[in-house]
Image: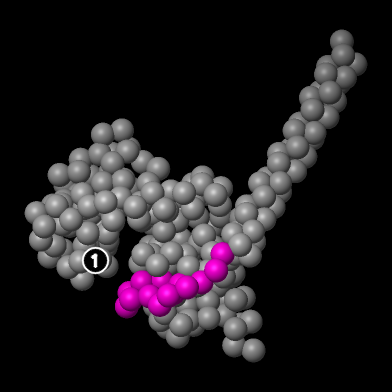
Amino acid sequence: MNSKKITVAALVAIVLVFFFLGMNAYQKRVQQSQAEKVSQAISQSAPSGSPADGQAKPADNRLIRFHSPVFGPSNAPVTIVEFFDPACEACRAFYPIVKNILQQYPNDVRLVLRYAPFHAGSDQVVKLLEASKRQNKYQPVLESLLAAQPQWADHGQPNLALAYQAAEAAGLDIKKAQADAQGSDIEAVLQQDIEDLTALEVTKTPTFFVNGRGLPSFGDQQLMALVAEEVAKARK
């Protein structure tokens, strides 16, 4: 009887070993595939035109578009691209971390935000954020929406009325913004970001790229370490 138990335990252990090896190989394939997608997008694109203030530099790959909101100096040698969802709790938690990174490297790092509206109602909030640019209220509206996120961002039934109240509290003319948010140009921005995140195989938020490099694994320490590495390279 004991020998049978030992045999079964050994078989279970062998199965678990192969399972974890398989999962590790799968994760590596996913990371490699995403890296190849980024590399291909960079090599196939061609920059053109000149951006307006507060927007990204010319689109040199699928990571950056003309419409993308930018925080930090436009000519910074290190670019963090974040695919984020305004209803994402992790995005809310990472916002002050990324903000601190920008403060730590005021001349070296810029943040480019891309939209990944995975949660219900996020597309409407994204459109409101885009409309807030026309009133020069993007950052205060973004921060107000993130601060009020626990109240409005129920993933099953988001309370958009509370999101609009948060935006209005940041000084936004909400009626004008809601009207502007229905424009075809803002819809095109949203669709472009969805197309890009799909091509880059972004499946969760927040997803970060630092000078085109994805994080080796998810976490704030990994993000800060990769930024520090790219800053050190840029300063040589």
Q: Residue at 56% of width from left, 52% of height from top?
A: 200
The boundaries of the magenta stretch are: 45-58
Q: Position of residue 20 (x, y in %)?
A: 74, 38
Along the horizontal axis of the image, is 106 left or right of 210?
A: left
Quadrant position of the N terminus in the picture: top right
Q: Position of residue 91 (x, y in %)?
A: 40, 55
Q: Residue at 14% of width from left, 52% of height from top?
A: 179
Q: Residue at 63% of width from left, 65% of height from top?
A: 43
In terms of secondary structure, what is the magenta stretch mainly? loop
Amino acid of disc 1:
Lys
Along the horizontal axis of the image, is 17 left or right of 167?
A: right
Quadrant of residue 137 within the rendered picture: bottom left
* Residue 223 colored in magenta in the image: no
Q: Is residue 187 above or below residue 154?
A: below
Q: Residue at 54% of width from left, 49% of height from top?
A: 199
* Residue 55 colored in magenta in the image: yes
Decide which of 165, 54 is in the foreground and name it: 54
Q: Secondary structure at mark 1?
A: helix
Report whether residue 42 is seen: yes
Decide which of 159, 75 is in the foreground and name it: 75
Q: Residue furthest bottom?
A: 236
Q: Position of residue 27 (x, y in %)?
A: 68, 45
Decide which of 200, 149 is in the foreground and name it: 200
Report whether residue 90 is seen: no
Residue labelled with disc 1: 133
Q: Is residue 41 above or below residue 53?
A: above
